[in-house]
Amino acid sequence: VQLQASGGGLVQAGGSLRLSCAASGDMLSRHVLGWFRQAPGKEREFVAAIIWSGGRTYYADSVKGRFTISRDIAKNTGYLQMNSLKPDDAAVYYCAADRQHCSGSDCYDSLRYDYWGQGTQVTVSS
């Protein structure tokens, strides 16, 4: 599976962006699509994940109620809708795929993800 993230850009605080993650190769039913982010000088952190087949979602507390992860199985593409953006949300955002099913906090662990996209920059101005 190869992943291509896109949709980043510059937005004012309070604004919205939608990131896309196009997968080449089949995202199988047991796969998990995750979004992570890394700001300068900080560790990569979990943002959200979705179980590809069933659609169950998981979110970091910092983005709950503001971000929505989704996927279009027919298009083999995942999305991260980001609303009410804050300067703290500024980072490089990466999409990743895990070949094995996960649940709960297991999905937060970046080490379990097998495939990574190249990242897309999100900048939020205050």
Image: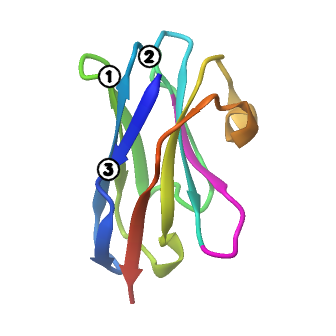
- Crowding at dot 1, Cα within 10 Å, few <14 / some 14-19 / many 20+, comes out as some
Is residue 63 highlighted in magenta? no
Which residue lies under the disc numbered 2? 27
Depth check: give the residue in front, 26 or 70.
26
The percent coordinates of residue 6 (x first, y second) are 32, 50
Residue drawn at (56%, 12%), measured in percent from left and top? Answer: 30
At label 1, which amino acid type do we have? Asn
* Left or right of 59 in this view: 21: left
Measured as percent of width and height from the top left, residue 111 is found at 75, 37
> Earlier along the polypeptide chain: callout 2 or callout 3?
3
Estimate how packed mark 2 is, as few (under 14), some (14 to 19) or many (20 or more) residues with alpha carbons within 10 Å.
Answer: many
Three-letter amino acid code of the residue under disc 2: Met
Residue assigned mark 1? 76
Residue range corresponding to the magenta coloring: 40-50
Amino acid identity at mark 3: Ser
Label 3 or label 1, whichever comes before in sequence order: 3
Q: Is disc 2 in contact with disc 1, using a CB cutoff of under 8 Å?
A: yes
Color style of the picture: rainbow
Disc 3 on helix, strand or loop? strand
Separation of disc 2 and disc 1 at Cα? 7 Å
Could you tell which of marks 2 and 1 lies nearer the N-terminus? 2
- Residue at figure coordinates x 29%, y 75% from the top left: 11
Say if residue 109 shows up in the picture: no
> What residue sits 47% from the left and 16% below the top?
54
Looking at the image, which residue is at 46% across and 53% down?
119
Which circle marks residue 6 in the picture? 3
Pick whichever, 124 or 120, lies toward us: 120
